[in-house]
Image (spheres, helix red, strand yellow):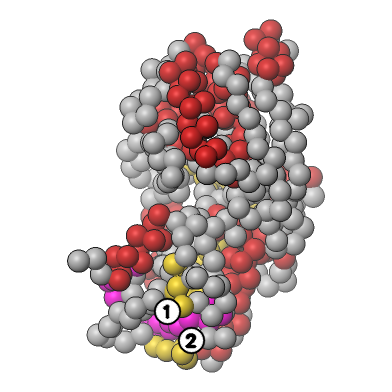
Amino acid sequence: MITWWKQASLAVILALPLAGVGSPALAADPVTCTPPVPSTTQPGYVVLDPNCEATGTPFTALAGAKVYTGIRDGAAYRIEVPQRWNGKLVVFAHGYRGTGTAVYVDNPDLRAHYIDAGYAWAASSYATNGYDVGQGVRDSYALIGLFRQVTGAPARSVIMTGKSMGGQVTAVAIETYPRTFSGAMPYCGVLGDTELFDYFLDANVTAAALTGVPITFPKTVPPDSYQDEWRAAAAKFMPALGVTTGRPPVLTAAGKTWSDVVERRTGGERPGFDSAFAYWNTATSLAPLNDLPFLFGLYPGLSGGTSYIAPGNVTDNRFTFYRSTDQRWPTAAEFRLNATVLRVRHTATADPGLAGIPRVDGNPRIPVLSLHDIGDLFVPFSMEQVYAKRAAAHGKAGLFVSRAIRGTGHCDFTQPELTTAFDDLTGWIRSGHRPAGDAILNPKVVAAPTFGCRFTNGSHPTYAAGACAAG
């Protein structure tokens, strides 16, 4: 028999605040997990019990801390406050959780470190799933007032942090409410807003062009039958590239060129890319296209380029010139590729507010310290470079520090990497002394064999490149 917890968890896995259900309460032992309750704001949604993990395991306070949980405006929340609270709060924004209709709250990666260091933390399930950054911003910001309400004490300083899509939630939140936060720590974040979806487009249209396979890009959200049309196209260009579902690629000449193009679209030549490219082409994509290699299931044409939330296609490659080399002048092969690649025009853009895909201006007013795996090909390292360029254009380069980590997976960080970054951020906020980072906009630095060594701390088993020197 499948329990309601397993059913709810499966709905979330396959698929991300606040007129309240009940009153804010202290979580107590023993905890009895209650069934999901219907959302009061989103028809068809259910909200999982914040006193339990999605697996059914009770959520309890760490030693020396007190937790508060509840459901408000269709979103579950958790708050944890150490006994020796320093008066500061960390708001954590979670990442993308698919398009299911069950929402749940979980704990930040640095939960124990926050409590040990005297920080309280708060997290929301958000009232919706999908790529709904705007809802993530609204529900995360609401936690600050909710914190004061349920604890009886206001936070005198608030740090915003989040991972993956939550990184975009973080970047948008600090620009939407610039006087609210004292610092921010996005990691593995979508700091380039719609440029993430441009990358998904680029990877797929160049794969097709390099193999001579004709593809289309529906101008509106296509019918489900388009998935089979796309599968048929992928079945033609995959063997021409040397890519096979579930097995490491054995690249053809066209496949090697494609790899070179993807490398330059995701941050430039850098150590460990070949192993990262093999890793992500071995991994299968998200359901329902989990019979395809990872990137091919993310083709924006499958959703009309909307990610099912924007009012039109947010992707555009009309003026993109694809490079497979770093030569000063494009090669004849590069000109041929650019002459044959499918060109797509956007019909929607990043939203200046909280609708659709919210825009990230890269105009912080507070210290921002970010981390990114250089082998991540889901939310690629280039997102850091996009944000760095935007910050520089606004004269805010001094308020952004980026750290490259020699990892391959998405959000593949060790606890020491994250704790060091958080401690350096809080030290920066306190002292005004900007901590060290990597020169991510310098191609020679990025291409160096030791790139990412400085801030990598611990094992990343799937990353393969020369070892960093000890010491």
**Chief SS of the magenta region:** loop
Measuring 48% from the left and 35% from the top, which residue is drawn there?
Answer: 228
Q: Which residue is mark 2?
A: 21
Residue at the far top in the pictured view: 332
Q: Amino acid at mark 2?
A: Val
Q: Which sits in the foreground, 327 or 330?
A: 330
Give the percent coordinates (x, y) of residue 467.
37, 30
Range drawn in magenta: 54-74
Measuring 29% from the left and 75% from the top, which residue is drawn there?
Answer: 58
| The quarter of the displayed image where residue 459 is located | top left
Give the percent coordinates (x, y) of residue 451.
51, 32
- Label 2 sits on a secondary structure element that is strand
Measuring 25% from the left and 85% from the top, which residue is drawn there?
Answer: 30
Q: Which residue is mark 1?
A: 37
In the shown orientation, is residue 224 left or right of residue 173? left
- Magenta span includes 337: no
10, above or below 458, in the image: below
213, above or below 373, in the image: above
Give the percent coordinates (x, y) of residue 180.
68, 72
Near mark 1 (Cα within 10 A), the count class, few <14, some 14-19 or many ≥20, is some
Residue at the far left in the pictured view: 1
| Circles 1 and 2: CB atoms closer than 8 Å | yes
From the viewer's perspective, is the residue at label 1 or at label 2 nearer?
A: 1
- Residue 131 seen in this snapshot: yes
Measure the C-alpha gap from mark 1 to mark 2: 9 Å
Q: Earlier in the sequence, mark 1 or mark 2?
A: 2
- Label 1 sits on a secondary structure element that is strand
